[in-house]
Image: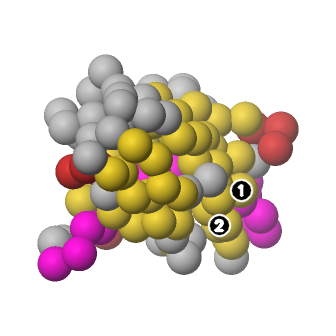
Amino acid sequence: QVQLVESGGGLVQAGGSLRLSCAASGRTSSIVVMGWFRQAPGKEREFVTAIRWSSRSTYYADSVKGRFTISRDNAKNTVYLQMNGLKPEDTAVYYCAAGRVSSTVVTGSRLYDYWGRGTQVTVSS
């Protein structure tokens, strides 16, 4: 089992920045990919970004490209999401996720086996 704990959410004005962290514990050696998803009120959960654990290849949703950056610290088993140029439409609960199976497609939530409880990000206009 893997446990994921997110932190770093909060309230920020449009144009501002936040950095989310996701600390993994447990059988972290089984992780091959980690990602961030978000869910706004009344909307489905959507893919934001992902990073492969070994190659560090990164993937982004079109809506966040150029504004968000995912990174990882293997020694700390932690993944970070740096969010710059935040917009009101970025308001959502952000979830960290980890997957054990390698796949060419990393945007689907079904790939991920473990999920954090989420952290709220609110961007005011």
**Farthest top residue?**
66
Left-right relation of 76 to 119: right
Is residue 55 in sight in this rendering?
A: yes
For residue 29: magenta? yes
Indicate which disc residue 4 carries.
Answer: 2
The three-letter amino acid code for the residue at tag 2 is Leu
Is residue 108 in sight in this rendering?
A: no
For residue 93: magenta? no
Q: Which residues are magenta?
A: 24-42
Q: Quadrant of residue 66?
A: top left
Is 125 placed above or below 86 here?
A: below
Is 125 placed above or below 113 here?
A: above
The three-letter amino acid code for the residue at tag 1 is Ala
Indicate which disc residue 122 carries.
Answer: none
Can you identify the residue that label 1 sits on? Answer: 23
Mark 1 neighbour class, 10 Å CA radius: few under 14, some 14 to 19, many 20 or more? some
Image coordinates for residue 119, horizontal then vertical, percent: 52, 66
Left-right relation of 91 to 33: left
Q: Are marks 2 and 1 in contact (CB under 8 Å)?
A: yes
Which secondary structure, mark 2? strand
**Closer to the camera in the image, 117 or 98:** 117
